[in-house]
Image (tube, rainbow, N blue to C red):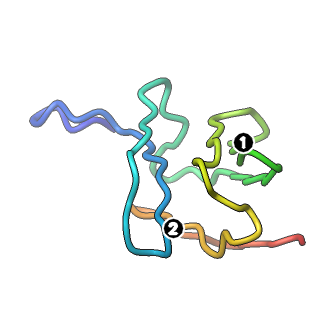
Amino acid sequence: MPNQAQKIKPHVIRNSSKNGVKWLTEERTFGTFPFHKGITHDIVFTAYGKSVTVDVDGAPFVKFVYRDGDDPVNVDQITVVGDVLIHRFEHKG
């Protein structure tokens, strides 16, 4: 829920870093925020040759295109920050 006192809309930020050190330019989604407190959501990250897609509850949500010079083979972590409880993480390689 947006904080009405501060007029902050909930959002999803996508970013990447080089060698875990330098963060690059953030990409933010200001469309419909699909998450709701107290509701369990299924989030699926699918890695392709040039991008990662994110589906929420079976519907496409966002697409993150790898940055110039990124090699998907070297992606070694996904970070989720916020009021989140992860029940299961499954990596299929």
Residue at x-position 50% and y-position 58%: 16
Amino acid type of disc 2? Thr
Count every numbered label the image shows and give the total.
2
Hey, which residue is sitting farthest right in the picture?
A: 93
Where does residue 28 sit, x and y in percent of width and height?
A: 42, 37
Quadrant in the picture for the C terminus:
bottom right
Amino acid type of disc 1? Asp
Q: Is 71 drawn above or below residue 48 in the view shown?
A: below
Where does residue 7 sit, x and y in percent of width and height?
A: 17, 30
Between 74 and 14, which is closer to the camera in this rendering? Answer: 74
Where does residue 26 sit, x and y in percent of width and height?
A: 39, 45
Between 92 and 7, which is closer to the camera in this rendering? Answer: 92
Which of the two labelled residues, at mark 2 and mark 1, occupies the earlier sequence position? 1
Disc 1 element: strand
> For the residues carrying marks 2 and 1, which lies nearer the camera in this image?
2
How crowded pointer 2 is (Cα within 10 Å; few <14, some 14-19, many 20+) is rated as few
Disc 2 element: loop
Residue at x-position 47% and y-position 52%: 15
The Cα atoms of the two marked residues, 2 and 1, are separated by 16 Å
Where does residue 54 sit, x and y in percent of width and height?
A: 69, 45
Between 54 and 5, which is closer to the camera in this rendering? Answer: 54
Determine whether, in the image, residue 23 is placed left or right of residue 86: left
Residue with the mark numbered 2:
79
Residue with the mark numbered 1:
55
Between 38 and 81, which is closer to the camera in this rendering? Answer: 81
